[in-house]
């Protein structure tokens, strides 16, 4: 009987956790998600290492290169540096999730980053032109178990095709996005072209009067 009751409790807890995760995915009406992507801009300075993304609840592990990368919006991730010879010998792809987590967080040969990464800036009103943000990361050093990475700048992208770059003043605070001013095509279509049209009309009128 006790085992039966324990099983019911565990089953209810599993349902509650699933409901919580599903609810966290729900966006309020009139709102939209603004996702983050990341990029390590100087990975080529460390050719002897393999860089791995590991997070909760996922990914279990993902190999990184100099391209942009992203992950599940509710995950919290870290970056790990593993000497290439070590990576080739441990065969991470043959491990289960528990073994991968233990290796990355406990093995003395692994360097662990000093920052964590979020997959989502947050939500904004659907009318907000903000579309996404790219955070560029720079590796400062790899010493023993310490992988020193800093957030160098963020590039905000907007639905009108514009982008705005902002440097990080503090590693713990993301620079706030600002709505960019009108783009060049705005000035072309709504200011320059009307002026040219008026100038052409004025020129035609003056020529007719002179004739």
Image (tube, grey):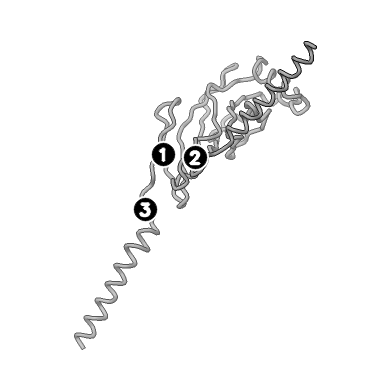
Asked if one can make out residue 30 in the rendered structure from this viewpoint, the answer is: yes
For the residues bearing labels 1 and 2, Cβ distance under 8 angstroms: yes
- Residue appearing at x 69%, y 24% in the figure: 14
Vertical placement of residue 178 versus 203, above or below: above
Quarter of the image that includes the C terminus: bottom left
In the rendered image, which residue does mark 1 sit on?
177
- Residue appearing at x 66%, y 20% in the figure: 104
Q: Position of residue 187 (x, y in %)?
A: 35, 59
Vertical placement of residue 14 versus 190, above or below: above
Q: Mark 1: few, some, or many residues within 10 Å (few <14, many ≥20)?
A: some
* Camera-nearest residue between 123 and 35: 123
Question: On the rendered structure, is 117 left or right of 1?
Answer: left
**Residue that protrudes farthest toward the bottom in the picture:** 211
> To which quarter of the image does residue 201 belong?
bottom left
Point out the tag, 1 or 3, that comes first from the N-terminus: 1
Q: Mark 3: few, some, or many residues within 10 Å (few <14, many ≥20)?
A: few
In the rendered image, which residue does mark 3 sit on?
182
How far separated are the C-alphas under marks 1 and 2? 9 Å
């Amino acid at each position: 009987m006790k085992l039966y009751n324990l099983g019911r409790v565990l089953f209810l807890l599993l349902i509650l956790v699933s409901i919580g995760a599903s609810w966290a995915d729900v966006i309020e009406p009139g709102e939209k998600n603004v996702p983050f992507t990341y990029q390590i801009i100087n990975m080529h300075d460390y050719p002897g290492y393999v860089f791995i993304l590991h997070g909760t609840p996922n990914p279990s592990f993902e190999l990184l290169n100099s391209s942009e990368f992203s992950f599940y919006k509710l995950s919290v991730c870290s970056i790990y540096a593993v000497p290439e010879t070590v990576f080739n010998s441990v065969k991470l792809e043959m491990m289960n999730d528990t073994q991968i987590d233990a290796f990355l967080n406990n093995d003395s040969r692994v360097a662990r980053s000093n920052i964590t990464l979020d997959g989502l800036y947050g939500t904004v009103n659907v009318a907000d032109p903000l579309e996404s943000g790219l955070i560029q990361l720079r590796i400062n050093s790899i010493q023993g178990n310490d992988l020193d990475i800093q957030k160098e700048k963020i590039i905000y992208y907007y639905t009108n095709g514009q982008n705005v770059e902002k440097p990080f003043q503090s590693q713990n605070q993301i620079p706030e996005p600002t709505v960019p001013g009108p783009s060049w095509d705005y000035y072309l279509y709504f200011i320059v072209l009307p002026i040219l049209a008026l100038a052409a009309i004025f020129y035609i009128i003056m020529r007719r009067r002179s004739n």
